[in-house]
Each structure stands twice: as C-alpha cells, then as structure tokens.
Image (cartoon, rainbow, N blue to C red):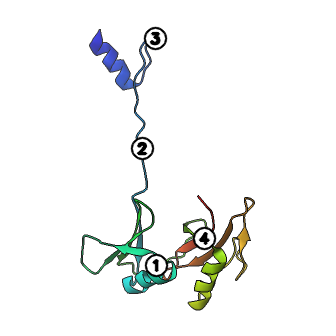
Amino acid sequence: MKPLVFFFCILGLSIPGIQAQTQKVRVQLNHIAVYVVDLKVSSHFYQNVIGLDTIPEPFHDGKHTWFSVGPKSHLHLIEGATSKTSPNKNTHLCFSVASVDSFIAVLKKNNIEYEDWPGNKMQVTTRVDGVKQIYFKDPDGYWIEINDAKE
C-alpha cells in the first residue's frame, strides 16, 4: 500500500488521513542585469548620479560593472547593446533616497531632466500615501524612479 500512497502524493491527489508536507521555497532578489551600449557612460551615471557603490565583479573583461543596491542585491551593467531602448515608464528601476528634493539638486547639477508620473517636466508626484517620486531616463533610455519611501 505504501507505494500506492507515494504514487498518489506525486500526482497531487489527496487521500483521506494523509497530508503531503510541502516546503515553501524562499526567494530573494539577487541581481538585476541591464544591457547597455557604453559601459563607461552608464557606469559613471549609476555611480555619480544615482550614487551606487561598485562591487567586485568576477569577469574582469571590461564589459561588466556591478553595483550594490541592497544588503544582498546587485545591479549588473553589461556592455554589448547595439542601440538604446525605450521601454514604457511602467518598466523601471526604483531607488529610495532620504530626500527627493536633495536628489533633484543632483539631477539639476548634471543637467538631467525629470518628470512626474503623468509626464509633466520638472514636476514631482506625491502618492496618496505621501511618498514623493520622480522619473527620468538613464543614458540607455531605461526609466529610473527615485522616491522617498521609508521601506
């Protein structure tokens, strides 16, 4: 009878009195990879405008830059794209800062235009929960959101 019970459990069928034990697999973000045209330009942008810190990358081939974006998460820039992209604003990377106004000063210093969610230039969106947010594009056309969310 045990082999039959095993067979029913594999098929996901329930047998009265027997409950299959399932383990929930814990998943966490490891990295996001962004394909870029010019690694030097994009690396400069993410390091000096966004303010990310570089971390060691294993390839040492001049085609990768890795950044820390959280305790165990990274952003990988990979050179090799043949053209810039133009995704919908709904597809974006988001970084939180202590002050959106202070970050806007960095954008202005670097002559980078930003907009609110509806697309109004040089405007800030305030969400219903009070979080301020702005949007702009990186050198390859990827949308970036900056907000002041606390978590």
Work out whether residue 6 or residue 93 is closer to the camera in this orientation and state it. 93
**Residue bearing the label numbered 1:** 46
Residue position marked by numbered label 4 in the rendering: 98
Q: Is residue 114 visible?
A: no
Which of the two discs, 1 and 2, labels the residue nearer the N terminus? 2
Q: Which amino acid is tagged 2?
A: Arg
Q: How many marks?
A: 4
Figure check: 143 above or below 83 = above
**Nearer the observer, disc 3 or disc 4?**
4
Q: CA distance from mark 1 to mark 3?
A: 57 Å
129 or 89: which is nearer to us? Answer: 129
Q: Earlier in the sequence, mark 1 or mark 4?
A: 1
- CA gap, disc 1 and disc 4: 17 Å
Q: Earlier in the sequence, mark 3 or mark 4?
A: 3
Query: What's the residue type where badge 4 is placed?
Result: Ala
Q: Check if mark 2's residue and mark 3's residue have beta carbons within 8 Å.
A: no
The x, y position of residue 145, in whole percent, is 59, 71
Q: Are marks 1 and 2 in contact (CB under 8 Å)?
A: no
What residue sits right under mark 2 in the picture? Answer: 26
Q: Residue at x 66, y 70 (%)?
A: 133
Q: Which mark is residue 16?
A: 3
Measure the alpha-carbon separation of dots 3 and 4: 55 Å
Type of amino acid at the residue the image marks with label 3: Pro
The kind of secondary structure element at disc 3 is loop
Tell me where residue 15 appears, x and y as whole percent.
Answer: 43, 14
Q: Which mark is residue 3?
A: none
